[in-house]
Image: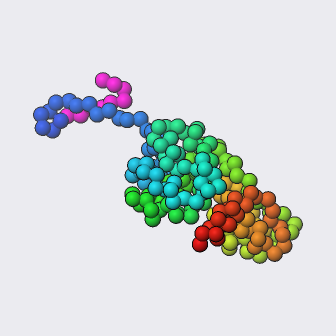
Amino acid sequence: MLPAARSFANHSGGQAMQEEIRPTTFADEVARVPGGKSLQMCYACGTCVSRCIIPWRDPAYNPRRVFHKVILGMRHEVFEDMTLWNCTACDLCYPACPQQIHISEVIGALRQLALEAGYTSPLETVTVDPILCSGCGNCVEVCPYDALHLTSWGSMRISTVDHNRCMGCGNCVAACPNKAIGGGSFADQPIREQLTQIL
């Protein structure tokens, strides 16, 4: 008998049967993380890619390809794929998906696993100058990625950045009355300009 197998009596005939215990796959791990279970429903039709606006800026962006890598167990390749970090969770893909998969939730589950494995976002993110920050909270209100939070700094409140959530969109930079926030790639700006042209 295989070490990874167990025997049990078959109720119909009393014969011993073997049930092999399958090793946990990368896809199984993803399915256990909140938001990752729907990965199993994807049949790689590509609708998510066709509806997404990120490929306008980055033609290599392809959630379908990333999901295929997950199924193949290519953990390192998935965690290093920029698709994982470029998803803005706009959910334009969701209503178009014939399986109603929340692609952004699956990407979020993959990001969580990547962070737990020691990977970090390669995107250029914003920084906050604690001397200039007044703690007004404007940046927190306008951040679509929940990347900014007000924290205590001595007797003051200042904004801090979660660099693994920040997409460098620039909303916080524009909202800051004290110019305390800088940096970032302002990744969404070209997309905003293109959307303005078509809308």
Q: Is residue 141 above or below residue 115?
A: below
Q: Which residue appears at 83% of the width and 67% of the height?
A: 180
Q: Which residue appears at 30% of the width and 23% of the height?
A: 1
Left or right of 139? Residue 91 is left
| Residue ranking furthest to the top | 1
Left or right of 85? Residue 10 is left
For residue 94, say whether it is visible: yes
Percent x, y for residue 130?
Answer: 84, 65
Q: Which residue appears at 60% of the width and 69% of the height?
A: 198
Q: Is residue 76 magenta?
A: no
Indicate the quadrant where residue 16 lies: top left
Q: Which residue appears at 60% of the width and 47% of the height?
A: 60
The magenta stretch is: 1-9
Percent x, y for residue 35?
Answer: 48, 56
| Residue ranking furthest to the front | 197
Q: Nearest the camera: 173 or 37?
A: 173
Q: Nearest the camera: 47 or 173?
A: 47
Indicate the quadrant where residue 13 lies: top left
Percent x, y for residue 58?
Answer: 63, 52
Left or right of 157? Residue 81 is left
Q: Is residue 150 above or below residue 51?
A: below
